[in-house]
Image (cartoon, grey):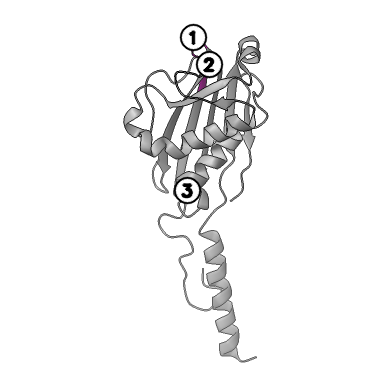
Amino acid sequence: MSKLHRIALALAATVAVAGCASAPAPGPVEVTRFHDAATLAAAHHGTVFVASAPGAEEDTLAQAPYKAAVAAELAKLGFSEAGSEGASLIAQVRVEHFRIGSEEKRRGPVSVGVGGSTGSYGSGLGLGIGFNLGGSKSSERLGTELGVMLRDKASGQTVWEGRARFTVSPKSELAEPAQGAHAIAKALFRDFPGNNGETIEIEVAE
């Protein structure tokens, strides 16, 4: 193998490494849940209407994939989706997006649905050629926080509340709203209703 050929292979390997490093794995989803065991047991498998949290109606379009993901997870748990008039429970959805830059602390947040009360419970391989494997934004992360409150429609009492948060690289597939919404909602409702007041971390894959 010629020296030129060996250099070409080394360059190709370096570019491949750079490509892999350009999209870091998503962070784990941090999930916290609270619930009233007695009232939740009575409401389980009831009918539910998925709505934006108070004050977030103007962001309905941006919230759509998250509300759809929440509705899908509730359906898996045995809840039946219904219209606002016929539902016994209201699932209020709020979403917040934020950005963490490589040279700055958390910015934002850029609200996509926060409104009203948000809770009731509390180098060159020696070849003489330099490569920028990351770039100035290599550590930039996009964050999403999803909150859902299940309220009894008649009394307005909160029977279950959950909050989930995670960050991903801008190049991650999970940076796309539909895929990110599915991943974070799935984590939020995993092992429903969860241990009251416990915060856990759930790994997600691309």
Query: 138 and 170: which one is in front?
Result: 170
Q: Which residues are magenta?
A: 149-157
**Would residue 10 be counted in the magenta stretch?**
no
Location of mark 2 (residue): 88
- Between tags 1 and 3, which lies in front? 1
Of the residues under marks 1 and 3, which one precedes in the sequence?
1
Circle 2 packing at 10 Å, graded few (<14), some (14-19), many (20+), is some
Q: CA distance from mark 2 to mark 3?
A: 34 Å
Residue count near mark 1 (Cα–Cα under 10 Å), binned few <14, some 14–19, many ≥20: few
Q: Quadrant of residue 8?
A: bottom right
Residue at the limit of the structure toward the bottom, as seen here:
2
Vertical placement of 73 versus 84: above or below? below
Q: Position of residue 203 (x, y in %)?
A: 63, 41
For label 2, the SS is loop
Disc 1 + disc 3, Cβ < 8 Å? no
Q: Amino acid at mark 2?
A: Ser
Q: Which residue is mark 1?
A: 154
Q: Residue 78: percent from the left, percent from the top? A: 64, 27
Counting residues from the start of the chain, the first of labels 2 and 3 encountered is 2
What residue did someone put label 3 on? 175
Q: Residue at x 58, y 78 (%)?
A: 10
Nearer-N-terminus badge (1/2): 2
Measure the C-alpha gap from mark 1 to mark 3: 37 Å
User: Which amino acid, by three-letter code, is at mark 1?
Assistant: Ala
Q: Residue furthest top?
A: 155
Q: Nearer the viewer, mark 2 or mark 3?
A: 2
Residue 173 or residue 159, whichever sits in front: 159
Tell which of 28 and 54 is nearer to you. Answer: 54
